[in-house]
Image: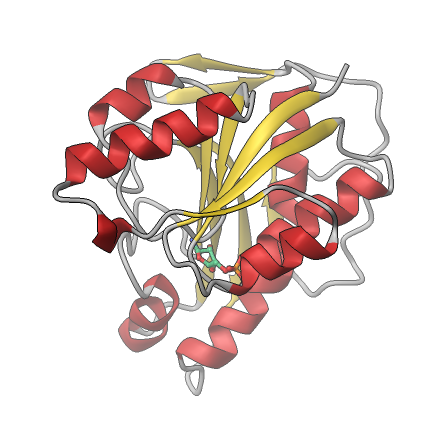
């Protein structure tokens, strides 16, 4: 069984690439039905085309209001046959109708340890604040920005001389590992939502070695292949 997913992007799409790589190497039982971008020039669309995936540019500026855009986005996702939605750097808040249509089946990745530093520029905000531990969060999406139940978080050290770029690069390395892992858990039906919390059903999979990345904490632990 593979889960049909739509991936929504606005930019580079490096997290999209990580998902594609895991699908292609057989560690992620999902199928990308469409990559949709609100910016037609998003490099994520180019990545999609390179891998023979449906790439849809849906510029929000072409729609009269947020509701109209949301309806078109929902139609594009539904028509692709997606049963779940993965936001990979999609810089727009999904409207209530979209969230209702895919509730419990939309994931987002945010480059900070939520609930700290939600919104844009989480990495820079964390660096400027002077935190010593930063990281990334994968969470279910609800109507509030960067708010839904947390699936997995990864922590990385932050240093006094870090800026948005240096800290962001360190975080990104972990993003590319935790996002495919989280989507794997969704695709294999191991995630359930209980109020604000997500439970992960156990599996007999050995844990991954993350010593090659950097000193960090990833919880729940990564499994082999991620
Ligand atoms: C990532 O930092 C992600 O956490 C945030 O947007 C960025 C997308 O990067 N939501 P990319 O397009 O996947 O390279």
Quadrant hosting residue 119: bottom left
Point 40% across, 82% down: residue? 163
201 over 162 or under it: above or below: above
The one of 48 and 92 positioned closer to us in this rendering: 48
Q: Is residue 17 above or below residue 108?
A: below
Q: Quadrant of residue 82?
A: top right
Determine which quarter of the picture holds residue 182. top right
From the viewer's perspective, tell me whether residue 86 is left or right of residue 120. right
Q: Position of residue 66 (x, y in %)?
A: 16, 40
In this view, 80 is above or below 48: above
Say which of 88 and 168 sits in front: 88
Q: Position of residue 173 (x, y in %)?
A: 64, 62
The answer to whether residue 120 shows anywhere in this view is yes
Does residue 134 lie above or below 169 as drawn? above
Give the side of residue 177 with respect to residue 42, left or right: right
Residue positioned 30% across, 44% down in the render:
115
């Amino acid at each position: 069984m593979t889960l049909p997913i739509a991936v929504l992007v606005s930019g580079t799409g490096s997290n999209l690439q990580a998902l594609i790589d895991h699908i292609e190497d057989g560690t992620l039982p999902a199928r990308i039905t469409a990559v949709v971008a609100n910016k037609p020039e998003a490099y994520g669309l180019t990545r999609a085309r390179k891998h023979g995936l449906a790439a849809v540019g849906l510029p929000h500026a072409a729609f009269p209001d947020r509701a109209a855009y949301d309806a078109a986005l929902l139609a594009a996702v539904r028509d692709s046959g997606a049963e779940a939605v993965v936001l990979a750097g999609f810089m727009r808040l999904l409207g209530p109708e979209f969230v209702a249509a895919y509730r419990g089946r939309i994931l987002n990745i945010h480059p900070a340890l939520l609930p700290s530093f939600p919104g844009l520029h989480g990495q820079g905000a964390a660096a400027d604040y002077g935190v010593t531990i930063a990281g990334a969060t994968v969470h279910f999406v609800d109507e509030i920005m960067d708010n839904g139940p947390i699936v997995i978080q990864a922590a990385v050290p932050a240093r006094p001389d870090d800026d948005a770029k240096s800290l962001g690069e360190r975080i990104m390395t972990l993003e590319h590992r935790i996002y495919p892992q989280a989507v794997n858990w969704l695709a294999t039906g191991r995630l359930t939502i209980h109020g604000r919390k997500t439970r992960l059903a156990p599996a007999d999979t050995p844990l991954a070695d993350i010593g090659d990345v950097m000193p960090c904490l990833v919880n729940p632990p990564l499994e082999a292949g991620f």
